[in-house]
Amino acid sequence: MLVIIGYVVVMVCVFGGFAMAGGHLAALFQPLELLMIGGGALGAFFVGNNGKAIKATLAALPTLLKGSRYTKTLYMELLSLMFDVLSKVRKEGLMSIEGDIESPAESPLFSKYPSVIEDHHIVEFMTDYLRLMVSGNMDAFQIENLMDNELETHHHEGAVPVHVIAKLGDGLPAFGIVAAVMGVVHTMESVGLPPSELGMLIAHALVGTFLGILLAYGFVGPLSGLLEQKLDESSKMFQCVKVTLLASLNGYAPALAVEFGRKVLYSTERPTFAELEDHIKKAKSK
């Protein structure tokens, strides 16, 4: 929603300011200039990226129109789930959660937290390392190193659409110049026309530069920044699970382990100690 609002503000301010200065909006409507700029950028997008990058970018674009799903409520559910799992381990031993981590969707522990279950990436991350803990063949240092490597891979994969969109935005002004040059070439080959008509041709050519810059900095460029923010948000959830599990491996009680996880969250979504404690108590009573 904010993306659409931002686009509306850009268009109203830019085109409205032009109209208020006495400009004619019809002069800015140049479909052929848009064809050259948009077509050139689209072609460069396919040339400069492999199939995985193209697929990841196209999949990421619809998420830009949605608000963040990483809310305080979601984090409280995640921490409550971690508390329940670690409490069961502490009371009944590691082998007691083997059935839960093999089939999370059918597990009584996991099914109490549908918002977490919906994110199969975080569930897979959590169950994979709980499975390693159950095996008993790895210490905390080895698991931490493996987690760091996996999180680095996750970040690199998530950053692919960010870089693709950023490069696309960086190229749009250049394609605007290409369109403008083509317009100038057309003007130069029409030097026999009256001055008024030549002036129109030059104006049409300059619109290409204008559109390239506007599309780059007003429409496409900001999307890469938004994608990067969403990537950082998703990574924070994995870090929360990582810190909680490592605290448990190092011998901390479940209540303290989830407190470690709570502390790594952004302050805007981080529940207070009292809020989390109250949420855990309510989850126990269900």
Image (tube, rainbow, N blue to C red):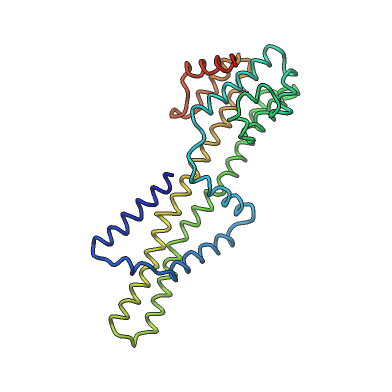
Residue 136: x %, y % from top left? 74, 21
Answer with left or right where residue 273 lies relative to residue 48. Answer: left
- Residue lying at 55% horizontally and 14% vertically, measured from the top left: 281
Res. 107 image quadrant: top right
Camera-side residue: 249 or 204? 204
Can I make out residue 84 in this image?
yes
User: Measured along the vertical axis of the image, is residue 50 above or below residue 144?
Assistant: below
- Residue lying at 33% horizontally and 68% vertically, measured from the top left: 26
Camera-side residue: 218 or 138? 218
- Residue lying at 46% horizontally and 49% vertically, measured from the top left: 223
Residue 204: x %, y % from top left? 36, 72
Q: Quadrant of the N terminus?
A: top left
Residue 75: x %, y % from top left? 53, 27
The residue furthest bottom is 192
User: Measured along the vertical axis of the image, is residue 258 above or below residue 238?
Assistant: above
* Number of marks drawn: 0
The residue furthest front is 286
Answer with left or right where residue 44 lies relative to residue 117. Answer: left
